[in-house]
Structure formats: C-alpha cells, structure tokens
Image (tube, rainbow, N blue to C red):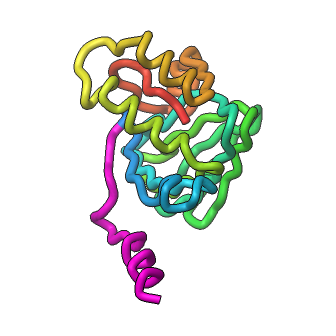
C-alpha cells in the first residue's frame, strides 16, 4: 500500500514542474512520458506565442496525436481540412495523415498534446539544442534529418511560407521541426 501511494505522489505535477524546452515558436513541457505510462502514451503541454507556427505540415509513422486546447485558438490542418480549435476542443491527428498546427490569434495559446504510443515526446528534447532559441545560426540539417528519421517523422518544410502567408503567422529564423 505504501509503495502505491509513493508512485502516485511521484506522478503528480504542479504547474511549475516538468522539464521544458523551446523548439522554434513551440514550447514543450513534459508531463507524462513512456516511463510513467508503461509506453502507452505521453502528455506534453504546448504554449505557443501569438501567431506562432507550432509545426509545418508533417506526418508521423508510429503515433497518433490528440490536441486538447486549454487557452487561445489553435489553427490545425489535418489532411486537407483546416479548422480553428478553441478551449475545450479536441483535435485528432492520426498517424500517416499529414498535419500542421499554429496559434491562430494575437494572444497566447496553450494546448495539451497526448501522443500514443509514447516515445515521440523525446523528439523535442533531442531537436531543441539544434534550433533557435538554443542554437544560433543555421541548423545542422544532417542532425535534424537523422533525428526525424529515427522518430519516423516526415516534414514538408516548403509548407512553412505557405502556412505563414495563408494564416498570418510570424516565422523567424530557421524553420521549426514539426510534430
């Protein structure tokens, strides 16, 4: 009984706990990972600045994603469908289907992202040192490509200017890697 109580105490996070990284305009707060869920799912929080691109069009080979909007408005493209999700909305992004997301407004936005199965959440920690704001200058495209390949991620970097123009997004510096 005491061991079960200690396990529960270890997985309760306060609002200021959890490893955090920033990848381009996307914030990532790690909340539950593969270790805590037995590999079943991961949960991350994504804060996005005003009009920030969270990820250009990209496709996951191994995992599904579910985005639950907490604050602001999150624009999403899943396949050819484009929508704006508001607080309380849940967006399903299945594996194998190209998708993108961004902050659709001039204020902050925040969402919870469920990744199933777990594992892909560590992608963010691996690419953060390779991109702004942690890395100045041009990104190491070989290292980024190797990381994307390891996680089964295909990315359409050519979608960045299209999404920026179509949705009024602010994109600065090298392109952000996607989810």
| Residue 130 in sight here | yes
Task: Tell whether 61 sits left or right of 6.
Answer: right
| Residue 108 in sight here | no
Horizontal and vertical percent position of residue 136: 23, 20
* Residue range (magenta): 1-22
Say if 53 sits above or below 11 in the image.
above
Residue under the image location 43 percent in, 21 percent down: 175
Task: Tell whether 87 sits left or right of 141.
Answer: right
Residue under the image location 57 percent in, 21 percent down: 149
Residue under the image location 50 percent in, 16 percent down: 145
Say if 103 sits above or below 159 in the image.
below
Horizontal and vertical percent position of residue 126: 39, 32
Horizontal and vertical percent position of residue 53: 47, 34
* Rendered-image quadrant of the C terminus: top right
Say if 159 sits above or below 104 in the image.
above
Q: Is residue 48 magenta?
A: no
Locate residue 122: give its quadrant. Answer: top left
Is residue 158 or residue 144 the one in the foreground?
144
Count of picture labels: 0
Residue under the image location 38 percent in, 52 percent down: 29
Locate residue 124: give its quadrant. Answer: top left
Is residue 5 or residue 178 the one in the foreground?
5
Q: Residue furthest bottom?
A: 1
């Amino acid at each position: 009984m005491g061991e079960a109580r200690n396990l529960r105490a270890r997985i309760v996070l306060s609002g200021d706990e959890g490893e955090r990284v920033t990848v381009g305009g996307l914030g990532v707060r790690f909340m539950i990972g593969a270790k805590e869920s037995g590999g079943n799912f991961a949960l991350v929080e994504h804060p996005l600045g005003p009009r920030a691109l969270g990820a250009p069009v990209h496709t996951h080979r191994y995992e599904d994603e579910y985005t639950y909007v907490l604050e602001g408005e999150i624009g999403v493209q899943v396949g050819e469908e484009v929508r704006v999700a508001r607080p309380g909305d849940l967006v399903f992004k299945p594996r194998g289907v190209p998708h993108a997301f961004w902050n659709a407004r001039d204020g902050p936005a925040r969402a919870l992202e469920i990744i199933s199965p777990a594992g892909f959440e560590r992608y963010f920690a691996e690419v953060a040192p390779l991109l702004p704001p942690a890395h100045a200058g041009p990104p190491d495209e070989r290292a980024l490509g190797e990381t994307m390949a390891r996680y089964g991620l295909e990315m359409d970097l050519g979608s960045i200017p299209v999404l920026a123009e179509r949705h009024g997004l602010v994109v600065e510096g090298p392109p952000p890697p996607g989810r």
